[in-house]
Amino acid sequence: MNRIIEREVVLKNFGKLVAELRNKTTVDNPDKGTRLLTQKGLALRTENKLGVEQIREIEDGTRAKLSPEDVHILATAFDLTEIETSEFFIAAGFVYPRPIDPPEPSRMKLLLTMHRFPAVAMNRLGDVLALNSYAIKLYSLDRDRLIALDSGPLGPNMLRMQFEEQFNVKRNHSNNLDLWEAEIVRNIRALRAESFRYQATTRYRQIYAELEKFPNFKHLWERAGKQNRDGLLIEPKLEAHHPDFGHLRFLVTRFPHGYISSDTIFTVLSPINLTDEAQIRLRDAVEEIEVHEFKPRPLG
């Protein structure tokens, strides 16, 4: 009964929003001048996918069978932006099924080449899309490891690199496993936050099932979840002891969504001290900045 009442409240409030948007929309008429958009005019804007009677029911909050399709038709008729459309769906009690926005390859490659520090582009599930030469050196990814990383059910997932011993990330923290765990927890926290709406997808389930096979994963997953619930900030620093370069310290910069695409996370590791000998050794190890791209994994 409570759910029925709650749904009725949502429909009433959504109806008021639709009426408000319509009443704020003006129409230029050569004969009659500027006028407010009528329910009939809104129906015409929907190309009669919604009739006047249906729009009246929506505005009155009595259209019990309001569907996501109805909401999408109205959002298009009002010419809402993507952010506005997302909020519009929420107001109607639905989740906006936003289309996945793939990264633009040439822009991604350009940005990875521009940065003279380790830089990585990932999707919201932590699958690495591409990384530059500095990141390749930092993670000790030779040609064979890059090929291996692009294969198997997990593919080039950042957490796979940190758990699976053949990719050496754990070895790079061999003198301080607390740093290794801290880096994993940071990435799990980011994954949990970024991937929330993808939990019902095939790819998310595949990633989680594969990660569960690693010892200590469940413990670290729960630890990351507790930190997220407690509202603790994600530490913007990363430290690693690389066997070839020495102790490396970075500031982690995550660029806003939309920097490459709305579903791509672009991260740069900027040295805290450019004159550190370890940082100099890392820079000297890169003769030419190149970008390695992996086969894209679906978000869905």
Image: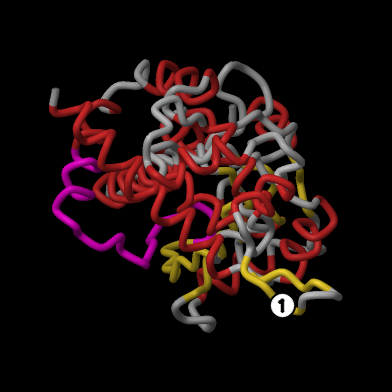
Residue at horizontal 73 percent and vertical 50 percent from the top: 45
Q: In which quarter of the image is the N terminus?
A: top left
Front-lying residue, 72 or 193:
72
**Residue at (44%, 71%) from the top-left corner?**
251
In the rendered structure, which segment of residues is drawn in magenta?
223-245
Q: Is residue 148 above or below residue 159?
A: above
From the viewer's perspective, is residue 113 above or below residue 33? above
Which of 175 and 145 lies nearest the eye of the viewer?
Answer: 145
Residue 231 in the magenta stretch? The answer is yes
Please identify the residue farthest to the front as the structure is shown.
31
The x and y percentages for residue 133 are 71, 56
At 48% from the left and 25% from the top, the residue drawn is 204
Front-lying residue, 2 or 252: 2
- Compared across the picture, whether 122 is left or right of 90 comes to right
Its colouring scheme is secondary structure
Classify residue 35 as left or right of residue 186.
Answer: right
Locate residue 282, reporting x and y percent. 60, 65
Q: Is mark 1 on a helix, strand or loop?
A: strand
| Mark 1 lies on residue | 34
| Amino acid on which disc 1 is placed | Thr
Rendered location of residue 165, percent (x, y) = 46, 29
41, above or below 95, in the image: below
Within the image, what quadrant is residue 272 found in? bottom left
Direction from residue 2 to residue 22 in the image, left or right = right
Q: Is 80 situated left or right of 93 in this image?
A: right
Q: Tell me residue 135's x, y (percent).
A: 62, 55
Label 1: how many Cα within 10 Å (few below 14, some 14–19, many 20+): few
Q: Which residue is drawn at 59% across and 27% down?
A: 300
Count of residue discs: 1
Up-down: is 54 above or below 111? above
Q: Which of 76 and 29 is in front in this view?
A: 29
